[in-house]
Image (spheres, rainbow, N blue to C red):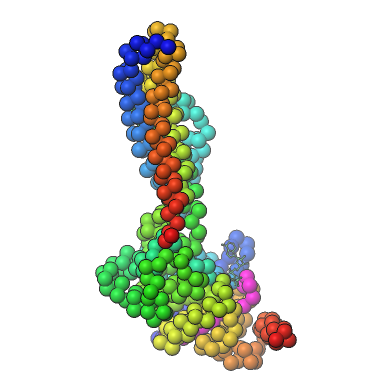
Amino acid sequence: MNWDFIWKYLPMYGEAALLTVKIGLAGIGIAIPVGFFCAVIQYFKVALLRRIVSVYIEISRNTPLLIQLFFIYYALPKIGIPTNPSVCGVAGLAFLGGSYMAEAFRSGLEAVETVQMESALSLGLKRGQALLYVILPQAVSVSVPAFVANIIFLLKETSVFSAVSLMDLMFTAKDLIGQYYKTTESLFMLVVFYMIILLPVSILGSVLERRVRRAGFGS
Amino acid sequence: MADELLTAEHLVKRFDDNTVLDDVSLSVKKGEVIVVVGPSGCGKSTLLRCLNALEPIQGGKITLDGEAVVYGSKNLAAIRQKIGMVFQSYDLFPHLSVLDNILLAPVKAQKRKKDEAAAEAMKLLERVGLADKAKSFPRQLSGGQKQRVAIVRALCMHPVMMLFDEVTAALDPEMVREVLDVMLNLAKQGMTMIIVTHEMQFAKAIADRVVFLENGEIIEDTDPNTFFEHPQTERAKQFLNIFSFERSKKDEKN
Ligand SMILES: Nc1ncnc2c1ncn2[C@@H]1O[C@H](COP(=O)(O)OP(=O)(O)OP(=O)(O)O)[C@@H](O)[C@H]1O
Ligand SMILES: [Mg+2]
């Protein structure tokens, strides 16, 4: 292991990690509201929109992120929508993550017994109010594990960003290997930096999971 | 007809091909207590659920206090505020304390001041003997206590009438009474109610009218004395026989 080499390229990895995190967070940040919106449409069985949502979910879940990125990166400009690597990365992650988040939220919403919604409605609450004050607080505890798993999954998926020439961690590692043939060092730093990003998320996630699991109301 | 509070005319309710309510007409006068009885699966719950438009209907018309009750209509939330409903399965919101369960709809749907609504909630809780449970959570309550809270929660909205769907069916026998007593008190105070129940003694005591439903049709609609002592139809007789058979079996054991 050549430590000088590692030391020298550490800042470069740092920058790449920052880019990875930024794009990852932006993509996930959009995926969460998209997923929530889709889950609510499915929960309320909104006519038409519900069809569109399920087509989106099927496409999104059954194609690899790499192909979604290629599509956004190469196909969209052909029909006159310009893209750049960063926008493409965020959009790709949001497109993939939206469907995974939708499934996480939907399973939470559906785990709440229907009589809860019905008694909220029969008290004269509007559907939106019933969702907000009665269903969501109960759905959260069911959704959290899948939600956390999705965030980790999506952050890992960022490793394909290099395919659309985003200078992310993977790109940096490949670049260094190509230039200097220092495969071991380059890959070592790649693993370390992904661990630095993901480990805190995992730990935070399991703390959160334990919190909601223990929130047995009134214990 | 001026004192008719709720009318349902020629209701038809189908789940796919299964006709669950077949031309059911029912009207309730202000202050009247109607008990709906009938064998399991005859459509009692469905009838109640249609009355406050939790279910869409395929035919007929429902009117509450002069206003049409229409599934999916804009003013449905406002109409439902006038109809209190208590379900068989405990339906308190598990993430909210007893008091917050009661206050949610008055504060969010009726935009009432929290203090004022809380004062009323406490008074109502006291009346059902649960003032000391205001801060408890639903899972810390017995079934009977939960149902009494559910009744208070509905009453706090100042409904013009109440619907009860077998609210004691899931309770241990010793808790049935405390819930039925609350309903008897409501009846004394003049609350308009439609009650679905399998408690025949209770039905006899509380009903102004008994409606016997079978296969989605109203077979008898009469006063409790006539229904229980001189049922007009063969099917009502058979239905009542089930209960007397149960009673005689118990008598033998004792
Ligand atoms: N959501 C639903 N989808 C399809 N069929 C339903 C639905 N709800 C009720 N049914 C059917 O409608 C019929 C009447 O059901 P309902 O629950 O109204 O009966 P019930 O008189 O309340 O019975 P019980 O005394 O057992 O509560 C039954 O045959 C039932 O299978
Ligand atoms: Mg029923």
Quarter of the figure with the N terminus of chain A: top left
* Residue in the image at 54% along x and 89% along y: B205
Indicate whether B30 appears above or below A125. Answer: below
Q: Is residue B84 magenta?
A: no
Which of the image's four quarters has the C terminus of chain A? bottom left
Residue nearer the viewer, A14 or A203: A203
Q: Residue at x 40, y 72 (%)?
A: B133
The boundaries of the magenta stretch are: B30-42
Q: Nearer the viewer, residue B221 or A67?
A: A67
Question: With respect to residue B24, does B73 lie above or below?
Answer: above
Would you place residue A184 above or below residue A86 in this image?
above
Q: Quadrant of ligand 1?
A: bottom right
Extreme-top residue of the structure: A180
Question: Is B234 positioned to the left or the right of B222 in the image?
Answer: right
Q: Position of residue A122 (x, y in %)?
A: 43, 68
Q: Quadrant of residue B45?
A: bottom right
> Does residue A88 appear in this view?
no
Relative depth, front residue between A25 and B172: B172
- Estimate the x, y position of residue A99 in percent, counting from the top left: 46, 39
Q: Is residue A159 visible?
A: yes
Picture layout, residue A47 above or below residue B224: above
Q: With B233 as the anchor, is B107 left or right in this view?
A: left
Q: Nearer the viewer, residue A195 or B32?
A: A195
Q: Residue at x 44, y 34 (%)?
A: A152
Q: At x 62% / y 70%, what residue is drawn?
A: B41
Chief secondary structure of the magenta span?
loop
Asked if residue B39 lies in the magenta stretch, the reply is: yes
Provide residue B141's location: percent of width, then percent of height: 47, 69
Instruction: Give the x, y percent position of residue A97.
Output: 43, 36
Number of callouts in the render? 0
